[in-house]
Image: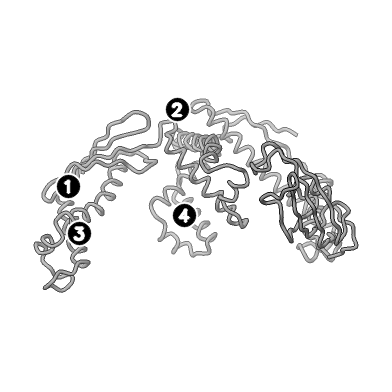
Amino acid sequence: MQVTMDKLEGSKVKLAIEVEAERVNKAVADAYVKVRGQVKIPGFRRGKAPRNILEAYVGKGVLYEEAMEKLLPEVYNEAVKQAKVSPVDQPSVDIEQFEEEKPFIFSAEIVVKPEVTIEGYKGIDIEKKRVEISDEDVEKELRSLQERLATYDVDNEARAAKGDILVIDFEGTIDDLPFEGGKAEGITLELGAGRFMPEFEDALMNAGGGEERQATITFPEDYHGADVAGKTAVFKIKVNEVRVRKLPEIDDELVKRISASQDVASFREELKTHLSAQAESDVERKMRDDVVEQAAEKAQVGIPEVMIEHEIDHMLKDMDLRLQYQQSSLQNYLETIGKDEAALREDFKPQAESRIKAELSLDTIAAIEELEVPQEEIDRALEDIARKYGQKPEQFAKKVTEDQLAAIKEGILRDKAIEFLLKNANIKEVA
């Protein structure tokens, strides 16, 4: 196979590809075998019709189309490897010749990863925050633990306070007229959680079961609901139930139930060790983010628009998955913020560009510094992924595609590039 490459404007290249006639002949022969098994021709058992009969019945073009559908992706992928380019989008293909006994000739116009120029990435100045876990930090974690382990008892005689849960009905009006979304029944509200507007929650402080309250709320001018933005609504609220929050006492018995410690004193030390490890991890993550951000600022690169659009696609998909996990959806989120998907994509664009620039910068640094990934590191990564999905490593490795392996190697290389940047950075410890 012959491949020649011409560079076009921007991050585009054009590959001119010529495939041997022998491969065309074999592809067409394979297509004949496949098609004859799919077509029933009168007078012949399925799969037994001679080729000349089959061609007369379905047309030679059907065989060529089937052959090309299989051969084109194969030779395109080979050509990309031969030309040593990294496509970032599907190619634009122009078929010049496809016929038996003749070479398969076509061209492919491809958007590829852009070239990156980067200098001065050694000796970046970054700060490392000193980790110091105080007794106050431990107490704060204990209070947080109490809140997570809180129970709720129905007590309609109690006066509702911050942290309690109310079950309410409400009906709102604007200029004495009801409005869409202004009425609901059986709604659960945690006082102080901030899920309702402050004036609404304030009106329910110290309320008891069976009580009725009233709240007057002026919606902000930029409120997501255009029909009520900037308007004043009056809500009549009925408290059906008060669920009083009860915090557990942190004692030895509780500690034994939730940890490996046997008493409160040792549990405090356990918490302190945990908080210290968490803080160290946060510091390390911050340093990695800082050094990558500064390195990317030193890079000169023109990012193809299609790369940005693909990255935004990934961001939206990840967001939708997270929202589904929270029993919501991307569409619900868009309705809540009063935007359409096009506007959200525009909002995501700067972040998408930053991500791509950072990744391209790390790839370039890895290439310049000739960083490598030993096979044993790829094997360990495959084992980690297999364990994550509850599969045996050897079975998982057989299912991994070439593209997936390349992505795993790319991820490891980027981690190595970050480690290189940190090793060569000027790190200053700060309080």
Task: Compute the Cα span from label 4 to label 3.
Answer: 38 Å
Q: Nearer the viewer, mark 2 or mark 3?
A: 3
Task: Compute the Cα span from label 2 to label 1.
Answer: 40 Å
Q: Nearer the viewer, mark 2 or mark 1?
A: 1
| Amino acid carrying mark 2 in the image | Thr
Q: How many C-alpha atoms fall within 10 Å of the one at disc 4: few (<14), some, or many (≥20)?
A: some
| Residue wearing tag 4 | 379
Earlier sequence position, callout 2 versus callout 1: 1
Depth check: 195 or 175 in front? 175
- Marks 3/1 in contact by CB < 8 Å: the verdict is no
Disc number for residue 117: 2
Earlier sequence position, callout 3 versus callout 1: 3
Q: Nearer the viewer, mark 1 or mark 4?
A: 1
Which corner quadrant holds the N terminus? top left
Give the image location of residue 252, x and y in percent. Answer: 85, 63
| Residue wearing tag 3 | 31
For image coordinates 11% across by 73% down, the residue present is: 43
| Residue wearing tag 1 | 98
SS state under label 4? helix
Task: Compute the Cα span from label 1 to label 4.
Answer: 42 Å
Q: How many C-alpha atoms fall within 10 Å of the one at disc 2: few (<14), some, or many (≥20)?
A: few
In-image side of 157 versus 50 (left or right): right
Depth check: 244 or 282 in front? 244
